[in-house]
Image (cartoon, rainbow, N blue to C red):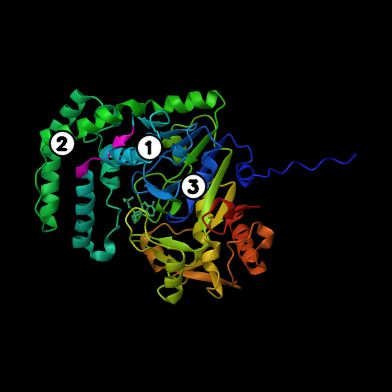
């Protein structure tokens, strides 16, 4: 008797998640790969959606009716009333920012009271962290010139994680919601911050208005009171949820090439952006995600400073920027654009332990002409088939390209992978074969029905 063919789910998202109980979606380039589209679509299939790294430097839009609304800290499952959205202890939380998101959602009729939880151990981004962020980037420019700037998002991410590492200067959510502790912490921290920020400001030729303990206390104690109902022991919530058989989706912020350990250091963010962050930033224990989806844009974009070996400075780069709408969600800055760097993507996929790739932005390449993908670097005459670690090597790296036939015409109406032009399929298959991980879906637009699951 013939074995019946396995049932093929008609919902593409069901085919994408393939029954995984613990899944993660991560970015494999410099951010803005289109993770939000995949997480949004998958989020409704999970009981718990968890952020584990970064802060308000990340950003993606959710659509509420016809309106578009930007989220930076609240996980993407927030529109699903039955999913719990957890911000893990590895995230740095700006209380004013997250309250703005909560209020914005409430105004649009999205109740968050029951399905948002914030880790009591997450560190708090204070206003002075943002000041310090800006002053430090300006100080680097004084010391090293403008090219030395990291070009941060200005959201206070680096200074907050630095205070976490320094320990004595940090405030966590459990401190924010306890008025006595908050006041004591501010009394200790403010004189030190005033001394360091005054010196930094002087170094860059600015003046600094000293912080006032009472003013800061009033402002942040008010935030703490409003946020207290959301604060929980996030590790315990994750543990019990998994024990009860709940399904968990981890939402990575930023991307592998911005990882503090593995990215193009020092032009990186300050957190663990790879799937390793689910252990360190959300306290997943005893198991690893059974599905780790790495999102790859079919070309590269980068915002801020740092090496970008495949960057384009010509009309093709401009075409990628305008067709791909490459402007930052958080800062509105125009993104730098260039060819797909497969060496970097393979490095990132290996670091993340990806089980599948999701390719986005394919339609942006339509009509660009002959395409190029980078498969190695030449650094001062030496060939690299793995990522060089040193910044001077990355800055000197010349891409070794493979040319690929281009394709034309709109791809957005394709409803199956098989309907794509053969040159577009060859491009996707080259990604798959070079990276060594199957491409499980290709996005030909931002709509749900434009995710072609293979
Ligand atoms: P920070 O995270 O604000 O400290 O910025 C450090 C670097 O990472 C800068 O070059 C930012 O432009 C970049 N960056 C941080 N988060 C994102 C993101 O979500 N998308 C793209 N770039 C980001």
Q: For the residue carrying disc 3, how many other residues have a C-alpha within 10 Å: few (<14), some (14-19), or many (20+)?
A: many
Question: Horizontal and vertical percent for residue 23?
Answer: 55, 39
User: What is the quadrant of the N terminus in the image?
Assistant: top right
Secondary-structure class at tag 1: loop
Q: In this view, does 279 lie above or below 444?
A: above
Viewer-nearest residue: 330 or 317: 330
Secondary-structure class at tag 2: helix
Viewer-nearest residue: 448 or 53: 448
Disc 3 residue lies near ligand 1 with CB under 8 A: no
Image quadrant where residue 225 sits: top left
Q: Give the range drawn in magenta.
A: 122-128
Sequence order check, earlier mark of 2 and 3? 3
Q: Are marks 1 and 2 in contact (CB under 8 Å)?
A: no
Q: Which mark is residue 26?
A: 3
Q: Are marks 2 and 3 in contact (CB under 8 Å)?
A: no
Disc 2 residue lies near ligand 1 with CB under 8 A: no
Q: Which of marks 2 and 3 is in front?
A: 2
Q: How far apart are marks 2 and 3 (CA)?
A: 36 Å
Q: How far apart are marks 1 and 3 (CA)?
A: 15 Å
Residue at numbered disc 1: 90
């Amino acid at each position: 008797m013939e074995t019946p063919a396995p049932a093929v789910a008609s919902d593409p998202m069901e085919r994408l998640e393939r029954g995984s109980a613990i899944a993660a979606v991560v970015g494999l380039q410099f951010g803005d790969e289109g993770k939000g589209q995949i997480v949004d679509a998958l989020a409704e299939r999970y009981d718990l959606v968890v952020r584990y790294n970064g802060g308000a430097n990340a950003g993606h839009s959710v659509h509420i009716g016809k309106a578009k609304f930007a989220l930076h800290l609240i996980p993407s499952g927030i529109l699903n009333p039955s999913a719990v959205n957890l911000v893990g202890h590895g995230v740095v939380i700006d209380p004013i920012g997250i309250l703005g998101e909560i209020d914005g959602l409430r105004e649009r009729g999205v109740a968050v009271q029951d399905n948002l939880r914030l880790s009591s151990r997450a560190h708090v981004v204070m206003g002075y962290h943002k000041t310090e962020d800006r002053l430090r980037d300006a100080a680097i420019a004084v010391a090293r010139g403008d090219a030395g700037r990291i070009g941060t998002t200005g959201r206070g991410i680096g200074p907050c994680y630095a205070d976490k590492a320094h320990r004595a200067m940090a405030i966590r959510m459990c401190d924010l919601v306890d008025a006595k502790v908050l006041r004591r912490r501010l009394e200790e921290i403010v004189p030190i911050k005033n001394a360091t920020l005054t010196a930094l400001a002087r170094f860059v030729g600015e003046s600094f208005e000293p912080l006032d303990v009472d003013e800061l206390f009033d402002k942040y104690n008010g935030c703490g009171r409003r946020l207290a109902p959301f604060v929980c022991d996030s590790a315990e919530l994750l543990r019990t949820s998994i024990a009860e058989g709940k399904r968990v989706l981890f939402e990575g912020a930023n991307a592998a090439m911005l990882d503090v350990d593995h990215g193009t250091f020092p032009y990186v963010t300050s957190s663990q952006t790879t799937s390793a962050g689910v252990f360190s930033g959300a306290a997943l224990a005893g198991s690893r995600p059974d599905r780790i989806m790495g999102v790859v844009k079919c070309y590269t974009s980068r915002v801020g400073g740092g090496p970008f070996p495949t960057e384009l400075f010509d009309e093709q780069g401009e075409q990628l920027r305008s067709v791909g709408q490459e402007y930052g969600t958080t800062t509105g800055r125009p993104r730098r654009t260039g060819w797909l760097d497969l060496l970097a993507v393979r490095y990132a996929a290996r670091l993340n332990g990806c089980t599948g790739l999701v390719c986005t932005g394919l339609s942006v390449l339509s009509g660009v002409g002959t395409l190029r993908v980078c498969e190695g670097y030449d650094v001062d005459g030496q060939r690299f088939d793995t990522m060089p670690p040193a910044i001077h090597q990355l800055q000197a790296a010349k891409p070794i390209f493979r040319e690929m036939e281009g394709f034309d015409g709109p791809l957005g109406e394709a409803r199956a992978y098989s309907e794509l032009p053969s040159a577009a399929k060859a491009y996707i298959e080259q990604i798959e074969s070079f990276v060594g991980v199957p491409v499980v879906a290709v996005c030909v637009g931002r709509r749900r029905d434009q995710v072609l699951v293979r």
